[in-house]
Amino acid sequence: MNSFNSPSFFAGQTVLVLGGDGFCGWPAALRFSSLAARVVILDNGARRETDRRLGVTSLTRIHSLQERVDAWRATGGGAIQTYDIDLAENYAGLRRVLLETRPDIIIHFAEQRSAPYSMMSPEGARHSVDNNIRATHNLLAALAETRLDPHLMHLGTIGVYGYATAGLKLPEGYLKVTAHGADGRAVDKEILYPGRPDSVYHMTKMLDQHLFEFYARYHGIRITDLHQGIVWGTQTAETGRDPRLVNRFDHDAIYGTVTNRFIVQALEGRPLTIYGSGSQTRGFIHIEDMLTCLTLAAATPTARGERVRILNQIAETSSINALARKVSRLTGAEVVHVDNPRCEPEGNEFEVDRGTFHDLGFVAHRFDEILGTEIAQLGDLLCPRGEGRRSSVA
Ligand SMILES: NC(=O)c1ccc[n+]([C@@H]2O[C@H](COP(=O)([O-])OP(=O)(O)OC[C@H]3O[C@@H](n4cnc5c(N)ncnc54)[C@H](O)[C@@H]3O)[C@@H](O)[C@H]2O)c1
């Protein structure tokens, strides 16, 4: 067992989880609580409200945040304090939470997180920018104003770089360049790797990066920006403890990821639908691995004055075809290609430098090792008595 996983590793530390009612934030709150941190959640319920407005829902039943927190306590977990505050709108409320809780670590998940949502209407695009940029900037401004010194960890995305052929291994945030001055002298520099987002959502994460660079340089804020891949999987060691703690499972067109879509299609005995050629390549990470990366990053904070640390948080890359083949092998599901409803490059190379987490000891779970177990667990979770389930996992 790694020492950061010892049950009291974060004892005495306060972890403020912004967006702690969401798919990634809830299991993260429970993981840090199980590692003895005092956990505080700030979430305004925006995601639940968006679900209601769009008529989409998690296939697993998500209890109210208060019921979830009470259930965690009832099953032996630590007390979790909650604040219903809009990070993008309520600067005074945020400032008060920071001063009351004085966090050692802040994990910032509180953003509109769907690329399709940001592209479906002008309102979706405007809301993504208004919410995400103001949320991140309010947080940074409040940290500068209060002069608190937590380690801020933000969930960004590897999609800030776009998915067009990169032609090189995507580095961890920075690119070494040589420019030539007027006198022809070569000047070596390291710059933020140029963003080239393919959606307004990804654009907000690119803009976040620049806010982080500024506030780290001018105000000494300690920041780790985690460029995460698509998170798949549902339950974690903690959310599986009680049905009231269960995590979200989204499979709709706005929030459902390709992994979830394939799994639901296979469980329902329907063909797996690949959008377009299927040679699009993406980065993936299982939710348990996301938690491991978060604890590793939290256990190795950056120092004041250090530039923003950017880490690629990805377990593996895979083409959509290869992923479909894996699900099909395990379930016997047929695979079909349909017209791609998305505007995205049809095929791309995608190589990512994952050196830092590797050096910190992270060993990723790969689809080949855990996809079968995950599908079986989901089948039981979504349909305990096998009702309506026409496929089984081989
Ligand atoms: N899920 C993924 O595959 C994935 C991949 C890469 C990066 N990320 C990033 O991780 C973060 C969390 O993603 P998720 O999948 O858990 O999303 P989610 O929608 O399930 O959770 C986000 C949470 O933040 C809250 N929130 C949003 N705006 C807020 C505001 N203004 N004030 C207070 N709370 C607010 C929502 O109510 C929700 O509970 C996002 O920033 C996302 O971009 C997610």
Image (cartoon, rainbow, N blue to C red):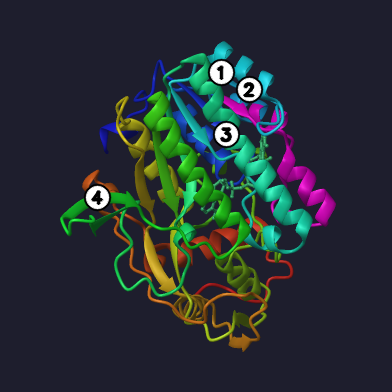
Residue identified by numbered label 4 = 189
Mark positioned earlier in the residue sequence (1 or 3) = 1
Q: Amino acid at mark 4?
A: Lys
Q: Nearer the viewer, mark 3 or mark 2?
A: 3
Residue identified by numbered label 2 = 94
Q: Amino acid at mark 2?
A: Leu
Marks 1/2: CA–CA distance: 6 Å
Q: Residue at x 26, y 32 (%)?
A: 3
Residue 219 or residue 240, whichever sits in front: 219
Residue count near mark 2 (Cα–Cα under 10 Å), binned few <14, some 14–19, many ≥20: many
- In magenta, the rendered stretch is 40-69
Marks 1/3: CA–CA distance: 15 Å
Residue 370 visible, this orientation: yes
Residue identified by numbered label 3 = 137
Marks 3/4: CA–CA distance: 27 Å
Mark positioned earlier in the residue sequence (3 or 2) = 2
Q: Quadrant of ligand 1?
A: top right
| Secondary structure of residue under mark 1 | helix
Q: Is residue 52 left or right of residue 377?
A: right
Mark sitting on residue 98: 1
- Residue 380 x %, y %: 61, 59
Image height of 208 relative to 328, above or below: above
Mark positioned earlier in the residue sequence (4 or 2) = 2
| Secondary structure of residue under mark 2 | helix
Image height of 381 relative to 153, above or below: below
Q: Amino acid at mark 3?
A: His
Q: Is mark 1 within 8 Å of ligand 1?
A: no
Marks 4/1: CA–CA distance: 36 Å
Marks 4/2: CA–CA distance: 37 Å
Q: What number of labels is visible? A: 4
Image height of 127 relative to 20, above or below: below
